[in-house]
Structure formats: structure tokens, C-alpha cells
Amino acid sequence: MAIIASVALLITEHQSHKLDSLRAALSVVVDPLKYLVDLPTVLIEQATDAVSSYSTLKKENTQLRDEQFIDKTRLLKFDSLEKENIRLRALLENSFKLGEQLLIAELLSINTAPYENIVVVNKGTRFGVHPQQPVLDANGVVGQVFRALPFSSEIMLITDPNHAIPVQVNRNGLLTIAVGSGQLNRLNLPFLPNNADIRPGDLLITSGLGGTFPSGYPVAVVDDFTPITNKPFVNITATPKAMLDRNRELLIVWSDSSPVSLSTPASNEKTPAGERSETNTADQSAGNELTRKTPAAEQPGTAGNQPAKSGLTHKAPATEQPKAAGDQPAKSGLTHKAPTAEQPKTAGEQPAKSSLTQKAPAGAQPEADLDE
Amino acid sequence: MNNYFSFGRIILTVIVAMCLRITPWPGFLTDINPDWVLLVLIYWALAVPERAGIFNAWTVGLLTDVLTGRVFGQYALTYTLIIYCCLILHKRLRQFPLPQQGLFIFFCLLFSQMLLFWLKNIQQPTQLHTSFWLPVFTGTLCWPLIYTALRRVRLSRRAAK
């Protein structure tokens, strides 16, 4: 009887997803065990926190502040660049995907399957996690959600042999696919012809093809390789940017799947602020506009920003205040917040609405030219 | 009343075994982490066959599937088959000295590992690592330990009776 039942289960699960709810129900029973096993690690961490000395904290604080300062400065130009990018894309009649929503998940230190690169994190469907969501860390792409349970979810790392991620070479846009090797420090690029324009040290970023991963996040750096002339394909490997074996905190990403409509950039920009902002209340906007970020540089800042108050929404620290202040103008356009340094903008907000040209100091001139 | 009590012991040990199963061991210990849940189940099947039946084994197997994120029924099937063998042979096995029991356990674990591999291979072609078989050996070596420990648990129950 039991044998028949289990064989039936095996077959059903293999064919369909009908058993997902059963799994979710059962996982409620066993998930406490995962947390129980994880408990010592958490306790040790807390104990370390508790006894860490004033000077250490102070040092760390200074360091973080420096880092944040640098990141903020880098972000200054980001806003205008992004806008410029949107406008250029509009010229090409191309749509542009906007921001992503992030959720910090913490790794549970448990080991479920010894020979697979699958990890378990402490956020599940109760936080809105769903399968196939991309997962990042401060340095790059980590993997994707493989199975979401109510209180935890399993994440398949990009290095899993069953995982492949569409990438492109940052230098020249060459598209290819990176396949996991089973080792945490290596990805294979099996589909490149021998004469492909790829060099050791090239950065691979997500290409956004396939729809699972948002485009533009760093994935890996190409290792040294020697071209073999008598074979059609080269054997190239790459080292993942993300610290797959060291990080405890991961970011689960909701990519905003609806691209911003770009009829004509001008008309879009000129839509009176009121029209859009009516629909969004202030805090919605906070929710919608979650961080859109330069991939690598800024995430440490976000991670430090911790609270993830509502669970999901999580803003880049820098952008928050000015946004709240300059709410109206920001929303009218294709949603862009002014990073901190843009005080001038908030001040001169009325004029800003009518014309485009009034952006962050740095990017202003070229943009104006473009529009006319 | 007493039924519930002893059943509680079984559940508790199974829970501990499940925890051991998913504990991240440092370094190579991860590779040789034996299937604690199965060992505990075998012990209970030999010691109190009237309590640890096939259905219980199946349930525990199902929970292990969920816990370790396998396809549903994989461990359920394996555990059911092995516990069935144990239940049939339990009278004979109890008479065996520990080393001989160990041999039986060795074959049980080997069989379970083979079954797991086979089931996995049906779903998708899998590469077999040599260290895949190591848990069988460590499991066998752990058997005397588990045997004595669980015997203690069981006898303390009897004393409490």
C-alpha cells in the first residue's frame, strides 16, 4: 500500500505541480527543524555582536559611513544617466524596464542535499517569494528561487550543474549562456565558438533574455583560457562574482515586469505631475519605486540598511529623503528620484516640471541637446 | 496512556535524527553524514515492531522528502521498503550479535542509497560521485552507537513504566 502510494506520489510530482500545496502543508511541520538547526549559528552571531567592543563597532561604523559616502557619490550621476538612457531608448522605440523590489533573506545554515548547490533561506511564500525569482548578493547574481515553501525557500545557485543563466559580455555585448559546473567557484561557457571575442577578465552580466533574471547584473569574470585551434568550441570558465560560499545575506528580487510605456518621451514628461501622482499616494510611490540600483557598488549599503520594515520594500538609503521632499516632480516623469545631492532640484521644483532639461547638474547639458 | 508516552519517545528520537540529517557539518564530514533518520527507524522497527510500523516509516519518509527538498515519495518509498524487511526479519535480527547486525544494516543502507540514486537517475541523468557511497560505511559504523543510545532511551521508558 505504502509502496504504491509513494510510487504514485513520485510520478505525480514528477509530472505536475499539483502536490505543491501538500508540500507546503507538510513543510510547516518540518520547517521548525530547519530553524532549530540554524539556531546555534544565530546565537553565536548574536553573542559575538553582544560582546564586540566599542572600538570595533566604532571602526566598523566609520568604515560603513565611508562606504556609504562613496556609494552616494557614485549614485549622483546615476539618476541623470538613467533618464538619458530611457530617452535614448525611446528614440530607438525600445522599452525600458524599471526598478526592482528587493527583499533581504538570510541563509539558514543547514545542509539538505550534499551534492547539489542548493541553499535554504528564511523567507518563503509568506513574504511573497515565488519560484524562479532571481537572487542576488552584494557582488552579483547568486541564483534563483527553486522552490518556495511558507517559511523558507530553496535557492538554486548559478553554479548548480542543472542551472544555466543567459549572460552577455559587458565589453561588447556578446551573448552566451553560463552553465553551472557543480563547483562553487566556477561557471562553464560551453557555447562559444573558437573565434568569439572574449578575453580573460571580461565581466559577464545578465542579458535579461529568458525573462528570469533582470538584465545588467554582474554574474562572473572570465578566467584565463587558452584557445584550442583545432576545435570548434573553446572551453572557457568563469568565476562567479557573488560570494556563494561566504555570504549569509541574500537579496531576493521582484523584477517589475511591466515595461514603462514610451510613447514619445516629450509627451510623457510633460504629463502634468498631478495626473500620476494622484494615483500614487506617497507611500505607494515609496513601495513602487524601490531601489533601482547600480548593481555592485551600492548593495552593501542597502544590506546595512537592514530594517526591511514592511518586509518587502526596501529603499536605497540615499534616495529616500529627497524623494519624500520632492515627491511631486519626481513622479511626473518616468519616476526618478533625485539623489541627495540634488537639493537644487527640489528647490526649483516648479520649473522642473514643465521642461525636461532640469536635471542633475552633471548630466544636464547633454540631455538638453538630445531633446531638442 | 503508556502508548502515547512511548510513541513520544520515538517521535523525539526521529526529530533529533532529522536535525542531525540537515546539520551543516564542517568540511568533508558533510559528505559522510549518514542517514540518521533511517538508522533510527531501523532501530525502532527491530526493538518495538508493533509501534514502528510501515505507515509510520512512510510518513517519516514523506517528511524527510519535504525537509531535504527531494521529489515527493523518494525517501518514503525507500524507508518503507527497508522497514518492511526489518519488520519481517526482526525476530532473527534481534538474536544477532552487534557485528552481524552491522552487516545487515550495511546492506540496508547500501540498498537505500542505490534506490535513491536510481530514483534520482530516472528523473534526470545524474553523475555519481564516489563519496556518494561513503554514508553507507559511516552509517554502519554509527550503528553500535545508535543501538546503545536508543536502547538506553527505550529502557528508561520501561523503567518509568
Image: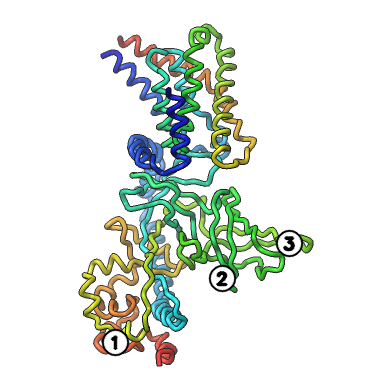
> Residue A368's spot in the image, x, y percent?
40, 90
Q: Nearer the viewer, residue A298 or B104?
A: B104
Q: CA distance from mark 1 to mark 3?
A: 56 Å
Q: What amino acid type should be assigned to the residue bearing mark 3?
A: Pro
Image position of A32 (left or right of A85): left
Say above or below: A221 vs A350: above
Query: Mark 1: few, some, or many residues within 10 Å (few <14, many ≥20)?
Result: some
Q: What amino acid type should be assigned to the residue bearing mark 1?
A: Ala
Q: Which residue is mark 3?
A: A232
Which quadrant would the C terminus of chain B be assigned to in this image? top left
Which of the two discs, 2 and 1, labels the residue nearer the N terminus?
A: 2
Which of the two discs, 1 and 3, labels the residue nearer the N terminus?
A: 3
Q: On the same chain: label 2 and label 1?
A: yes
Say above or below: A86 vs A290: below
Question: Would you say residue A66 is visible in this rendering?
Answer: no
Q: Residue at x 44, y 39 (%)?
A: A13
**What is the secondary structure assignment of the residue under circle 2?**
loop
Q: Which residue is mark 1?
A: A352
Q: Residue at x 41, y 31 (%)?
A: B62
